[in-house]
């Protein structure tokens, strides 16, 4: 019969390894994920600018938007990316809202 105390460290090690594997899957950025899905460069640039603007707006009460106004009117992909980035990004600390 096995010792019940020897099972606990084994379960602990298995849980720790599982958690590390799960966390390593989260290391890629949203930009990398979208690029892997085949989104175009203008969309990705707009997404990054929109996301940056959302985070900045939450921290500084609306100052510091990063947006290329000319591209917003001339490039639909950049504009769509900017809007998506602004809508989908969030600040980790909700105390900024």
Image (cartoon, rainbow, N blue to C red):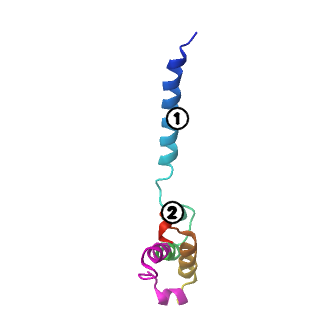
Residue pointed to by mark 2: 30
What residue span does the magenta drawing correspond to? Answer: 51-73
Q: Position of residue 86 (x, y in %)?
A: 54, 75
Mark 2 neighbour class, 10 Å CA radius: few under 14, some 14 to 19, many 20 or more: some
Q: Are marks 1 and 2 in contact (CB under 8 Å)?
A: no
Q: Position of residue 11 (x, y in %)?
A: 53, 28
Residue 15: mark in rendering: 1
Direction top: furthest residue: 1
Dividing the picture into quarters, in which one does residue 61 lie?
A: bottom left
Q: Position of residue 4 (x, y in %)?
A: 55, 17
Which is nearer the N-term, disc 1 or disc 2?
1
Predominant secondary structure, magenta span: helix
Dividing the picture into quarters, in which one does residue 64 lie?
A: bottom left
Please give the name of the residue rendered at 52% of the width and 68% of the height, measured from the top-left corner: 90
Please give the name of the residue rendered at 54% of the width and 90% of the height, measured from the top-left corner: 73
Q: Nearer the viewer, residue 41 or 95?
A: 95
Direction front: furthest residue: 95
Q: Position of residue 95 (x, y in %)?
A: 48, 67
* Residue 61 in magenta stretch: yes
What whole-number distance in Å separates the C-alpha atoms at marks 1 and 2? 27 Å
- Badge nearest the viewer, 1 or 2: 1
Tell me the quarter of the image containing the N terminus.
top right
Residue 66: mark in rendering: none
Q: Nearer the viewer, residue 77 or 6?
A: 6
Check the image and report above or below for 23 versus 18: below
* Label 1 secondary element: helix
* Label 2 secondary element: helix
């Amino acid at each position: 019969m096995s010792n019940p105390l020897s099972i606990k460290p084994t379960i602990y090690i298995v849980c720790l390894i599982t958690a590390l594997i799960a966390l390593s899957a989260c290391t890629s950025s949203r930009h990398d994920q979208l690029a892997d899905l085949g989104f175009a460069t203008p969309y990705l640039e707009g997404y990054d600018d929109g996301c940056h603007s959302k985070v900045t707006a939450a921290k500084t009460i609306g100052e510091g938007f990063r947006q290329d106004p000319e591209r917003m009117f001339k490039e639909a992909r950049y504009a769509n990316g900017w809007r998506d980035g602004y809508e989908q990004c969030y600040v980790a600390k909700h105390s900024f809202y």
